[in-house]
Image: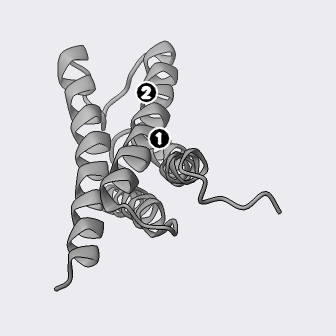
């Protein structure tokens, strides 16, 4: 495996650790079950936090991946979205789905984080 592939994999893993780890920490510290009912204000805050975490994961992960394309952000976006969909499908008719829906809403922010990293590095053309 070449160094570009290793850096890409490590970048995607870092991005996922930022998103998933930050989300788990938020639910743990707030003592809220992500699959149970929650107050509306916490749902809104957690979705905003998810967007920030996905964005940060996309930015940091793609910086580590050091690619001139957006593959790290794309992979991270897909991982976040697929995990949310699998979690939804695994709980039909059981529990609340607000946290999974929030993850789906947050997922594209990883791609935006990667895009912003590319823009800051001058890799985005001014078409």
Residue that label 2 marks: 49
Quick check: 5 above or below 117? below
**Mark 2, residues whose alpha carbon is within 10 Å: few (<14), some, or many (≥20)?**
some
Q: Give the quarter of the figure containing the N terminus.
A: bottom left
Residue that label 1 marks: 55
Q: Secondary structure at mark 1?
A: helix
Where is residue 3? Give x, y as percent. Answer: 21, 75
Where is residue 120? Give x, y as percent. Answer: 56, 44
Q: Nearer the viewer, residue 79 or 121?
A: 121
Residue mark closest to the camera, 2 vs 1: 1
**Mark 1, residues whose alpha carbon is within 10 Å: few (<14), some, or many (≥20)?**
many
Q: Is residue 35 left or right of residue 29?
A: right
Where is residue 109? Give x, y as percent. Answer: 53, 45
Which mark, residue 117? none
At 50% from the left and 43% from the top, the residue drawn is 106
Q: CA distance from mark 2 to mark 1?
A: 10 Å
At 53% from the left and 50% from the top, the residue drawn is 121
């Amino acid at each position: 495996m070449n160094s570009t592939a290793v850096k890409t994999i490590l970048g995607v893993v870092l991005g996922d650790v930022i998103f998933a780890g930050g989300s788990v920490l938020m639910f743990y510290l707030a003592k809220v079950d992500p699959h149970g009912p929650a107050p509306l204000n916490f749902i809104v805050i957690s979705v905003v936090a998810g967007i920030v975490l996905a964005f940060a994961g996309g930015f940091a992960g793609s910086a580590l991946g050091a690619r001139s394309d957006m593959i790290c952000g794309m992979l991270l976006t897909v991982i976040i979205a697929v995990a949310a969909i699998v979690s939804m499908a695994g709980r039909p008719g059981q529990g609340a789905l607000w946290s999974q829906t929030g993850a789906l809403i947050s997922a594209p922010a990883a791609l935006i984080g990667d895009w912003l990293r590319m823009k800051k590095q001058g890799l985005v053309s001014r078409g």
